[in-house]
Image (cartoon, rainbow, N blue to C red):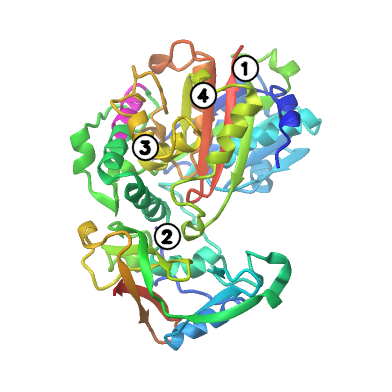
């Protein structure tokens, strides 16, 4: 357990500024390869499906956020002091319609295994907080 | 890609001549990580009949070899701080084999020391990594959450009830081995299936008894040339095969949640050693969680994906079973300071040399040690044998 009581915040990097800026406006912007058409998460300075193409091979695309639950866990023992007041909470990997997998939380459901099923449809929820990046969470569609 | 014929020529060109733990494992607030490193180093060298002054190569993880060599007062001519999680020390064995065979060094020392339970210095993580940027803000921090999500996906693909039963089997079997190991944290404490199912949730689907211990501990390994191994005080073990690699760091980037990199390193290590699965007498498999053992057995190729629960059923991996796994009691019940991988080698060597006390296997001539590091991220597999 780490000692700080504040939650770790995303530190946006040059390659991801556009992603985090999008979330502030409740928009999800993903990178896609202009040659292969493959989406990728997280943002990089080149397409991993066509690396030699470099930054020229990347286009940013606004997507809907329609997703399905790929897997989840329900956290009872807080792994960081910042989450001590949140347990139990649901962590998840969700698969967006475009094929990429995103780490997130599921909110708006009881943190019970029977309340969640793999493949259930999800929609985005934007969690804003003053002076911090907006987090992209999901809830049942 | 690995060159198979060159690897087969490398097989057997270095021997493990010494293994040891630090002097006290478990809850040891009176000792720092570097005390564990140094105690284990001296003990392992003594086990082989060597002195610290003989060491010309140092390998460690979690710490830089700069700090460990300075503390030990040695000046290595070969240095390797490869740090890819708890599997690192298994990978170091392979690196030592290559370095010795190439002539860079003759007496390689691998050390580990970690006060997972009592360390006075906090672990600092780089806040600039993709994992810190995309996972940590959502509370996806630390192994139970990430391994738990992988296990939940496995349950979806292969059946929740049989996965749960397999995880319970592994927890109970491993504890039975610990009850035969006086160095084990749970030496005096048996555990039943009911204890497993009634233990509290850490990160569903993981009960407390699915999760490894958090202890203070150290261990070390001494590796040398076949020539110098002839003088080893307590016998030597040959390094026959090895494989290493990784395919992600954070769990959300794992290419296939139910298949870890052992899928590649297991077959490579066995092929280099020129053996098949049925030749092996012992499997030492890094058990950060019960699930890690289940998926590793499949990855290593002992059975097909999804067949792990049937393969290990009915206490087959427990004392008396015909497929012994983690005879020291594992990270689950013996010790787990954070980066446990080195202890898989320590126990394999003891079993192969016939020095495992009450838990000694009959006819143990070939063993595989398999480390998984990070968040199912990296694996290192080593095949060890005695003539």
Tag 1 and tag 4 share a subunit: yes
Local secondary structure at mark 2: loop
**Residue marked by disc 2:** B141
- Chain under callout 2: B
Distance from label 2 to label 1 (Cα)? 41 Å
Pick whichever, B56 or B179, lies toward us. Answer: B179
Pick whichever, B109 or B199, lies toward us. Answer: B199
- Picture quarter containing residue B50? top right
> Magenta span covers which residues?
B171-180
**Residue marked by disc 1:** B236
Q: Sequence order check: which comes first, mark 4 or mark 2? A: 2
Distance from label 1 to label 4 (Cα)? 22 Å
Taking the magenta stretch, the answer to whether it contains residue B176 is yes
- Chain under callout 3: B
Distance from label 3 to label 1 (Cα)? 28 Å
Distance from label 3 to label 2 (Cα)? 20 Å
Q: Residue at x 52, y 34 (%)?
A: B370
Q: Are marks 3 and 4 in contact (CB under 8 Å)?
A: no
Quarter of the picture containing the N terminus of chain B is top right
**Residue marked by disc 3:** B332
Local secondary structure at mark 1: loop
Q: Are marks 3 and 2 in contact (CB under 8 Å)?
A: no
């Amino acid at each position: 357990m780490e000692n700080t009581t504040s939650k770790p915040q995303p530190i946006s990097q040059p390659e991801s500024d556009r992603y985090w800026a999008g979330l502030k406006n409740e928009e999800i912007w993903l990178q896609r390869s202009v040659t292969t058409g493959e989406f990728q998460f997280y943002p990089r300075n080149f397409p991993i499906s066509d690396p030699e193409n470099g930054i020229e091979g990347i286009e940013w695309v606004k997507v809907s956020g329609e997703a399905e639950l790929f897997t989840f866990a329900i956290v009872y023992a807080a792994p960081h002091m910042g989450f001590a007041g949140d347990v139990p909470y649901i962590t998840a990997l969700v698969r967006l319609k475009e094929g990429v997998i995103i780490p997130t939380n599921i909110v708006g459901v009881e943190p019970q295994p029977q309340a969640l099923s793999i493949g259930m449809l999800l929609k985005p929820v934007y969690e804003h907080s003053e002076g911090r990046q907006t987090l992209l969470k999901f809830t049942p569609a | 890609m690995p060159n198979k014929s060159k690897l087969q020529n490398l097989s057997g060109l270095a021997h493990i001549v010494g293994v040891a733990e630090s002097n006290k494992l478990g809850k040891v607030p009176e000792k720092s990580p570097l005390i564990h490193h140094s105690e284990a180093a001296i003990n392992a060298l003594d086990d082989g009949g060597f002195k610290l002054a003989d060491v010309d190569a140092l390998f460690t993880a979690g710490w830089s070899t700069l700090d460990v060599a300075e503390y030990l007062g040695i000046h290595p001519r070969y240095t390797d701080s490869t740090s890819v999680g708890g599997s690192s020390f298994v990978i170091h064995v392979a690196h030592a084999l290559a370095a010795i065979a190439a002539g860079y060094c003759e007496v390689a020392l691998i050390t580990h020391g970690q006060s997972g339970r009592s360390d006075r210095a906090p672990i600092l993580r780089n806040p600039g990594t993709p994992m810190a940027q995309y996972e940590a803000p959502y509370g996806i921090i630390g192994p139970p959450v990430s391994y738990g999500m992988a296990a939940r996906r496995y349950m979806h693909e292969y059946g929740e009830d049989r996965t749960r039963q397999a995880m319970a089997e592994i927890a109970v079997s491993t504890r039975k081995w610990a009850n035969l190991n006086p160095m084990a944290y749970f030496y005096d404490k048996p555990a039943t299936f009911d204890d497993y199912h009634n233990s509290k949730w850490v990160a569903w689907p993981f009960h407390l008894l699915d999760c490894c211990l958090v202890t203070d501990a150290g261990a070390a390994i001494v590796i040398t040339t076949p020539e110098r191994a002839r003088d080893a005080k307590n016998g030597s073990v040959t390094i026959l095969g090895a494989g290493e690699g990784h395919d992600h760091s954070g769990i959300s980037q794992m290419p296939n949640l139910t298949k870890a990199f052992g899928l590649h390193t297991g077959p490579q290590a066995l092929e280099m050693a020129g053996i098949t699965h049925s030749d092996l007498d012992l499997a030492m498999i890094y058990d950060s969680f019960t699930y890690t053992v289940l998926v590793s057995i499949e990855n290593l190729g002992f059975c097909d994906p999804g067949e792990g629960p049937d393969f290990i059923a009915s206490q087959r991996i427990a004392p008396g079973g015909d497929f012994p796994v983690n005879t020291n009691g594992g990270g689950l019940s013996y010790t787990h300071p954070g980066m446990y991988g080195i202890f898989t080698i320590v126990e394999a060597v003891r079993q192969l040399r016939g020095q495992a006390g009450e838990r000694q296997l009959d006819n143990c001539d070939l063993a595989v040690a398999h480390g998984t590091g990070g968040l199912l991220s990296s694996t290192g597999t080593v095949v060890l044998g005695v003539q």
